[in-house]
Amino acid sequence: MVPSRRPRLTPDRALPVAPGPPPVPTDALVRAARDGHARAFQELVHRFRPRIRALALQLTANQSDADDVTQDVFLRAWEQLRNFEGRSAFFTWIYRIAVNRALQVRQRSASRPMIDPDDPRVTLAVAADGHSHPHHAIELRERYGQLLWAFDQLSPLLRTTVALTTLQGLSHPEAAAVLNCPEGTIAWRMHEARAKLRDALARCNAAPIDAGAPARRARSAQRDRDPNTLSLAWALAAAFQS
């Protein structure tokens, strides 16, 4: 009896791997969570926690405060979920909770020094951009510290608007929904923020920052990147562009 020959699987003849199930839509998770399904809410936490924590860190400038804000945001969201009527997107609703809570925490904090070398946002930005050469990282740390100090000099409303649009990558309509204001108000605040950022950098004698191609790349890739390793300084530099 002649044994049967099995076809050899070469790379171009390899069997395709079956794709996994598509992710459950956010709206479906919200409906299930409102009905009391804790696992659905856990999935919402898993889906939104990285961006909420990044926003909290951007607004509080403190790792511990960002962790506390993040935990408090999802506790409040769970407690208030039955009151969520779906008139806005879930992310808009939870971002609004995060913004309000982060601003409350920041208001209680003492003012930061002019340039804080231990700013965790600087550390994250340097980790994203300064790995190529140690000397480059040292220079980046100084420049990023100046930029973030200027960012922190903005009023809470301007700082939040820049964080949502430039750092979080929200469109002007999305940021307007989170902050419950007209879209034109977002454009006006960004215009004001640019002028104030330039003035603040001038006061600390910082050289102009070239927002150029790195800033455009950072801004266009916001939604596809891990928000905890965002090149925060380049993304913020995009706010200087007209």
Image (cartoon, rainbow, N blue to C red):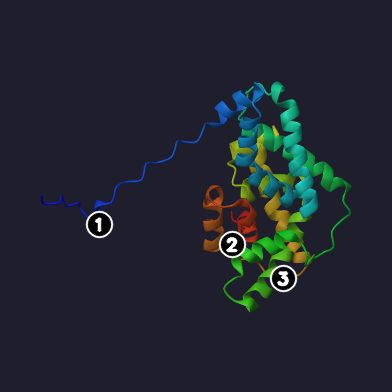
* Tag 2 residue: 211
Q: Is residue 89 above or below residue 225?
A: above
Q: Nearer the viewer, mark 3 or mark 1?
A: 1
Q: Residues within 10 Å of mark 3 (few under 14, many from 20)?
A: some
Element marked by disc 3? helix
Query: For the residues marked 1 and 2, what is the alpha-carbon distance in whole angstroms?
Result: 48 Å
Residue type for callout 1:
Thr
In this view, the residue in front, 208 or 22, is: 22
Task: Tell me if I can see residue 177 in this picture.
Answer: no
Q: Residue 142: where, in percent of width, then height?
A: 72, 70
Element marked by disc 1? loop
Left or right of 222? Residue 92 is right
Residue shown at the point (70%, 55%) measured from the top left: 195
Q: Residues within 10 Å of mark 1 (few under 14, many from 20)?
A: few
**Disc 1 and disc 2 in contact, CB within 8 angstroms:** no
Q: Residues within 10 Å of mark 2 (few under 14, many from 20)?
A: some
Q: Is residue 134 above or below residue 100?
A: below
Q: Is residue 104 above or below residue 60?
A: above
Task: Tell me if I can see residue 165 in this picture.
Answer: yes
Q: Nearer the viewer, mark 1 or mark 2?
A: 1
In this view, the residue in front, 214 or 48, is: 48
Left or right of 213? Residue 200 is right
In which image quadrant can residue 161 be found? top right
* Tag 1 residue: 10
Q: Residue 228: where, in percent of width, then height?
A: 64, 54
In which image quadrant can residue 136 be found? bottom right
Indicate which disc, 3 or 1, sits on the residue closer to the N terminus.
1
Q: Is residue 88 above or below residue 115?
A: above
* Tag 3 residue: 142
Residue shown at the point (72%, 30%) measured from the top left: 78
Q: Check the image and name the residue furthest to the front.
A: 1
